[in-house]
Amino acid sequence: MRFLFYTHSLISDWNHGNAHFLRGVIRELLRRRHEATALEPGDSWSRRNLIDDQGVGPIMAFLKNFPELRTAIYEDDFDHEAAVSTADVVVVHEWTDPKIVKQLGRIRREGGRFTLVFHDTHHRAVTAKADIARLDLSNYDLVLAFGEALRERYLRSGWGRHVYTWHEAADTALFQPLPGVDKRGDLVWIGNWGDEERSAEIVSLFVEPARELQLKATVRGVRYPEAALGKLREAGIAFGGWIANAAVPRAFGEHRATVHIPRRPYVGALPGIPTIRVFEALACGIPLVSAPWDDVEGLFRSGKDFVFARGSEEMKRLLRQVLHEPDFAREMAASGLATIHARHTCAHRVDELLRIVAPYRPGKAAAHTAREEATL
């Protein structure tokens, strides 16, 4: 089949974790002999910020690290009707311009011979509901939501009749253990500041434990304000700024443990949705200590694949255990890696995607709808 992905960006992963997942999904589709290409807007916020922050070097590195990926940048005069005319499945990310979201729906309604999919990987459905509500999804065949709580939110709000849960996952062609890499540090946190959505938690569950335990710790990420950088300096924590996702496995490999600190909207309003870094860290075989979040869908084996720290003191205790009890650390890392390989790779998600879209393919959609209505 021929897949076309409307992305915010495939080229840039600057404060844009969904690029990690889509790269892995597209590579897996290509491995299975499907065709898969991507489009991204000329005014992509992530790509603009990446160039402003790092220059064009990362763009060239993307082409080198992912030579099989094909992506094109479109401007206002782009012919979307021509672009989708040869596609079998068109997947539209929720950061796509609302006018284009509507236009693609119109093309589908007026005879487009493709399956039209809307893909949501953010918390705007609860934190900026008006942004999602104004999207015209009436002509979309189905919606993919990256967690059951988000799927239920779409259904309750009437934003789509056919809504499926499609979690993110690890691109295990990239994210894997690197046993030959020397350990240069104790603890690494790879994450962005997050618009004050987890600033207090970063301090209490990473900065303060690292300072009090006198760990050799590193932070990689973007959008850290000067006040936050000052706290890192005071704690003796190295700040490395942006890191390309292709370099993250080595960064994990050079450290003995990592942490996960979810943003508050996911903890409170959208439980059960970890960020993609959880999948990626476990895929690299690094012990993970996580701030609290409710794994309501049972994605992982809590206490085996990783451990929860419900406050600063418990974080310090668990970090001591991970760093000073090698058997405990090895067993947890092996368990997390096994769960990723069993359930949470991009290959698993491609399996799911192909199963989900199959009933909506032209010629099958009408029969699928008739069967569904007969059961109501």
Image: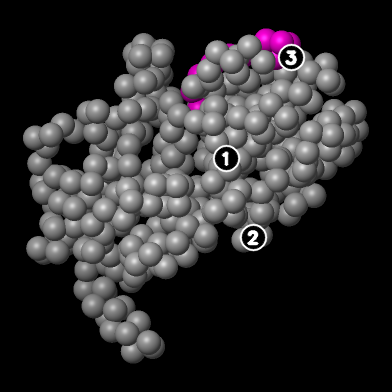
User: Going 32% across and 85% down the picture, which residue do you hit?
Assistant: 373
User: Quick check: 51 left or right of 242?
Assistant: left
Residue under numbered circle 1? 263
Which residue is under mark 3?
235
Residue range highlighted in magenta: 233-245
The label nearer to you, 1 versus 2, is 1
Report helix, strand or loop for mark 1: loop
Q: Is residue 347 above or below residue 314?
A: below
Give the Cα distance between marks 2 and 3. Answer: 35 Å
Check the image and report above or below for 253 versus 166. above
Q: Is residue 239 magenta?
A: yes
Whether residue 121 can be seen here = no
Residue 359 got which mark?
none
Report the Cα–Cα distance between label 1 and label 2: 16 Å
Which residue carries the number 2 mark?
296
Q: Is residue 27 above or below residue 62?
A: below
Residue, x 42% and y 68% (percent of image)? Answer: 156
Residue 227 counted in the magenta span: no
CA–CA distance in space, label 3 to label 1:
22 Å
Crowding near the residue tagged with mark 2, few <14, some 14–19, many ≥20 C-alpha atoms within 10 Å: few
Other-residue count near label 1 (Cα within 10 Å), few / some / many at <14 / 14–19 / ≥20: many
SS at circle 2: loop
